[in-house]
Amino acid sequence: MGALEPGARPASTERVVLDGRDGTPIPAIVAHPDDGDPTGALVVHPDLMGVRPLFDDLCRRLATHGYAVCCPEPFARAPAIVREADAPDARLAYLPELDDDAQLADLAVAADRLGREPVAVLCF
């Protein structure tokens, strides 16, 4: 599988903190085309290692194709030792502790941040 090639539109990313519906701060990446209104909206659910530079780049590349993008950290409620781990073992061990309702609520908050409908969700 090849990498997503950048599109024709210039795009920017920023790191933000979303307010989870339960009050938890949710680190996230937001990206958008610089030259006008997006043509669509995507919420990206990152893989096990969460929000990191790989997803800054992916979100920016998606935005170059005209999408508004938001990528929230799925381990925002995990202890620091889990969130800050460089290896996947700590996060993998913590997976059973993740709350499905909280995860879905965070994705909904990310979609709301984009301010567009409809919103698609991409899971990695």
Image (spheres, rainbow, N blue to C red):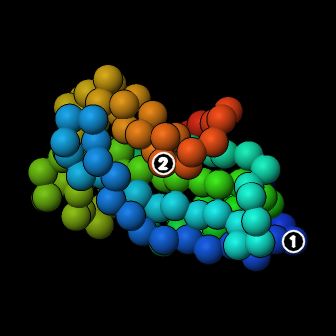
Image-based side of 116 in relation to 108, left or right: right
Which quadrant of the structure image shows residue 59? bottom right
Image-based side of 42 in relation to 24, left or right: right
Secondary structure beneath label 2? helix
Q: Which residue is mark 1?
A: 8
User: Where residue 120 appears, x then y in whole percent?
Assistant: 65, 36
User: Taking the image as drawn, is residue 7 in sight?
Assistant: yes
Which quadrant of the structure image shows residue 24? top left
Query: Amino acid type of disc 1?
Result: Ala
User: Where residue 117 appears, x then y in whole percent?
Assistant: 65, 35
Residue 97 against residue 1 in the figure, above or below? above
N-terminal of the two: label 1 or label 2?
1
Question: What residue is shown at x 22% (from left), y 64% (from top)?
Answer: 84
Residue 120 against residue 58 in the figure, above or below? above
Residue 103 against residue 110 in the figure, above or below? above
Question: What residue is shown at x 71% (from left), y 66% (from top)?
Answer: 33
Which quadrant of the structure image shows residue 104? top left
The 10 Å Cα crowd at callout 1, few under 14, some 14 to 19, many 20 or more, is few
Residue 77 against residue 105 in the figure, above or below? below
